[in-house]
Image (tube, grey):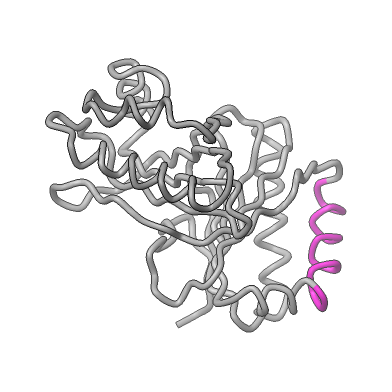
C-alpha cells in the first residue's frame, strides 16, 4: 500500500460501490494530527482488506474534527472487514489517542457531480456540506435543483472547482464534497451570495425553500494523509 500527504481521492472513480464517511471529534489540532498518524500507522501494519480502495483523512480548519472518507468496491467487502479486522485496528488507534468521539459512520453512494469550467486546479480546501432530506426522492430532487442553479450561474465564483453530491443508502442524508481553491475563496462566495447559496441564479431560491430538506451545516477541511493499495 501507499501513504501520501496527497493526492485527494478520485471521487468519481468507476469501481467505487460504496463510500463510508466517519467524523471523529478530537477537540484540538494536536489530537487531530495524532489521530491521523495513529490511523495511518494502524492501517500500514494490517493486511489490506479485499475491496478497500482508498482512505483519505481530512482535518477541519477549526481544529476539532478528523473526517475519514473511505472508498470500497461494495458494502459486502466492508462488512467483511468490520467482522474480521476492524476491532483490532480501532483498538490500536484508541490506545494511541484515547477519548476519540465517533458519532457514527454514514454509508453513501455518489449521485451526481458538477465540475467547473476552466483549466485543472488543485483544491486546497474541501467543504463538506451536510443536508437532511425526507427520503431519496426529495434528496435527488434537491441535488438536481442545486446543479441546475450552478449551471444557470452567469458569474460563478472562480474558487469552486467541483461539487460531488452523495446520498446515504437510506435516502435521509446528503453530503456535498466540494473542492475549492482555498478557504478564502469559499468565505468570499458565501459573503457575496448569502447562507445556503453560492450564486445569484433564480434557481437558488428554490434550493433554499424546498420543503423536506434541512441544512445541517458545513465544515472546511484540508487533506492530511491518504492511503491506497500499491499499484
Quarter of the rendering containing residue 31: top right
For the record, the magenta segment spans: 83-97
Q: Is residue 206 above or below residue 55?
A: above
Q: Is residue 213 above or below residue 121?
A: above
Quadrant (top left, top right, bottom left, bottom right) of the N terminus: bottom right
Is residue 143 shown in magenta?
Answer: no
- Percent position of residue 195, x then y: 41, 20
Quarter of the rendering containing residue 18: bottom right
- Percent position of residue 207, x then y: 38, 32
Quadrant (top left, top right, bottom left, bottom right) of the C terminus: bottom left
- Label the magenta part by its dominant secondary structure: helix
Callout count: 0
- Percent position of residue 67, x then y: 61, 47
- Percent position of residue 215, x then y: 53, 30
Q: Residue at x 56, y 62 (%)?
A: 19
Q: Residue at x 35, y 34 (%)?
A: 182
Choose between 142 and 3: the one closer to the eye: 142
Q: Residue at x 30, y 19 (%)?
A: 193
Residue 210 in the figure: left or right of residue 24 = left
Choose between 20 and 171: the one closer to the eye: 171
Is residue 84 shown in magenta?
Answer: yes
Q: Residue at x 66, y 79 (%)?
A: 77
Choose between 182 and 97: the one closer to the eye: 182
Amino acid at each position: 500500500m501507499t501513504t501520501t500527504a496527497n493526492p485527494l481521492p478520485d471521487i468519481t472513480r468507476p469501481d467505487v460501490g460504496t463510500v463510508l464517511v466517519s467524523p471523529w471529534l478530537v477537540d484540538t489540532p494536536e489530537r487531530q494530527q495524532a489521530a491521523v498518524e495513529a490511523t495511518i500507522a494502524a492501517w500500514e501494519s494490517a493486511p489490506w482488506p479485499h475491496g478497500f480502495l482508498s482512505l483519505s483523512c481530512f482535518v477541519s480548519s477549526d481544529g476539532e474534527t478528523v473526517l475519514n472518507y473511505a472508498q470500497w468496491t461494495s458494502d459486502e467487502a466492508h462488512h467483511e472487514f468490520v467482522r474480521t479486522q476492524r476491532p483490532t485496528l480501532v483498538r490500536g488507534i484508541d490506545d494511541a489517542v484515547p477519548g476519540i468521539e465517533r458519532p457514527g459512520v454514514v454509508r453513501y453512494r455518489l449521485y451526481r457531480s458538477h465540475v467547473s469550467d476552466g483549466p485543472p486546479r488543485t483544491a486546497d480546501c474541501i467543504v463538506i456540506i451536510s443536508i437532511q432530506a425526507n427520503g431519496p426522492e426529495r434528496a435527488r430532487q434537491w441535488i438536481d435543483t442545486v446543479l441546475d442553479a450552478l449551471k444557470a450561474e452567469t458569474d460563478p465564483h472562480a474558487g469552486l472547482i467541483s461539487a460531488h453530491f452523495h446520498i446515504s443508502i437510506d435516502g435521509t442524508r446528503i453530503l456535498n464534497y466540494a473542492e475549492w481553491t482555498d478557504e478564502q475563496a469559499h468565505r468570499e462566495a458565501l459573503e457575496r451570495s448569502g447562507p445556503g447559496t453560492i450564486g445569484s441564479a433564480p434557481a437558488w431560491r428554490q434550493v433554499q425553500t424546498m420543503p423536506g430538506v434541512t441544512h445541517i451545516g458545513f465544515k472546511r477541511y484540508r487533506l492530511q494523509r491518504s492511503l491506497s493499495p500499491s499499484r
